Amino acid sequence: MSTLDLTLGALEIPILISSVLYGVTCLQAFLYTVTERSFGDPRWVQVMVGLVWLLETGHTVFTWILLYSYTVTNFGDPSVVFSTPWSLGYSYVFTAALGSIVQTFFAYRIYILTGRRIIPIISWCAAASRLATGTALAILTTSSHGILDFTARFSWLETAHLTVDVATDALITTSLCYHLLRHTAVSKPTRRVVHRLVLYTVETGLATSTCAVATIICSRVQASNLVGLGFVMIYPRLFANSLLAALNSRQGLRRMASADNSWSIGDVWDASVLQFRPDSDHQTMVSQLEHREDLMGHALQQEREALTVELEDMVPSRLSYVSAHSRFVTVITFSRAVLHFVSVLMGNGYET
């Protein structure tokens, strides 16, 4: 394997993959703009989605500029591969901003779901530190005398930056799964949707954490090439797509709820993302569903009791009608018998 395979090739292929994922991001953003009215998301969520898409677009443009400078502008000059163009530094800033926004949103979702501030505050502080260290990495990258010089001097900062990212993702994923699964006394359709939510949460958290761990390993083991930098090109796409997938998956969960004929689980994902506000009584989403299902069961019980009372009222009325009719027939029969008896006595031959 030649030197270009582990340098220019290790950078070119991830940039192409990230470009494909950027297309997925654009599709996800378009789907959200089409369906967001059906969810009634607050304005700040819509602004956040637009900001994420703009940051993704900016990051993609800078990676294209980086690839163009390596393959076209400086074509035939292998030494430029280990240089640090200005576009590389800007891509670090966009990556840090995207990750911070997404982690802040998911931490806010934990706050809405639980009403507790400890884990969200820790996650928000970690997201802020991510933005600060990402900006510092961008400045240090452009001021270094090449990627190898940057790696030799500041690899510890990049490792700490990515380690905080992995720890934050693990904290958010674990917290969401715990609070979604802590209540199991719900109907079977509701449990199915909750388990689907847990699966979505694990998948999104696992994707970003795996990419961060791969970046750390490659940066430490393969410090003389650009394999680790290639993972950095893909990293922000995973954050953006995880956020947009979380928002757009609500439509599918609503269809699942309709297919299960469950009146309450159509709002599960909305509740776990946005709907329950922090100034409410801070009940968990599943507890809200249990309460609503109890109310529905109580309403059905009341309806059943009302129907029973109505039937009980109808039965005496029917019996009264039958009794009155029987008395009427008895009186008519007795009257005809009396008339017949009188006619026989009088010899008139009265025929009934």
Image (spheres, rainbow, N blue to C red):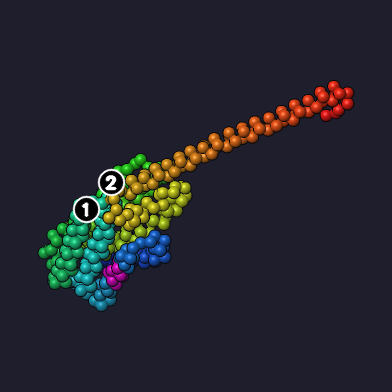
- Which residue occupies the extreme left position in the image? 153
Q: Is residue 135 visible?
A: yes
Task: Locate residue 59 relative to residue 294 in the image: left or right.
Answer: left
CA gap, disc 2 to disc 1?
16 Å
The amino acid beneath tag 2 is: Tyr
Residue 60 painted magenta: yes
What is the chief secondary structure element of the magenta stretch?
helix
User: Mark 2 or 1, which is nearer the eye?
Assistant: 1
- Which residue occupies the extreme front position in the image? 346
Q: Please tell me which of labels 2 and 1 falls first in the chain.
A: 1
Residue 132 painted magenta: no
Residue at (24%, 68%) from the top-left corner? 94
Residue at (68%, 30%) from the top-left corner? 327
Question: What is the quadrant of the C terminus in the image?
Answer: top right
Residue 178, which numbered label? 2
Task: Locate residue 150 relative to residue 322 in the image: left or right.
Answer: left
Front position in the image: 211 or 220: 211
Image x and y of residue 155, in percent: 14, 61
**Residue 209 quadrant:** bottom left
Question: What is the quadrant of the N terminus in the image?
Answer: bottom left
Residue at (23%, 62%) from the top-left corner? 100
Residue 138, placed above or below residue 347: below
The amino acid beneath tag 1 is: Arg
Image x and y of residue 210, in percent: 26, 54
Helix, strand or loop at label 2? It is: helix
Where does the magenta region start and end? Answer: 51-61
Task: Locate residue 250 relative to residue 71 in the image: left or right.
Answer: right
Residue at (48%, 38%) from the top-left corner? 305
**Residue 236 quadrant:** bottom left
Residue highlighted by disc 1? 117
**Residue 335 quadrant:** top right
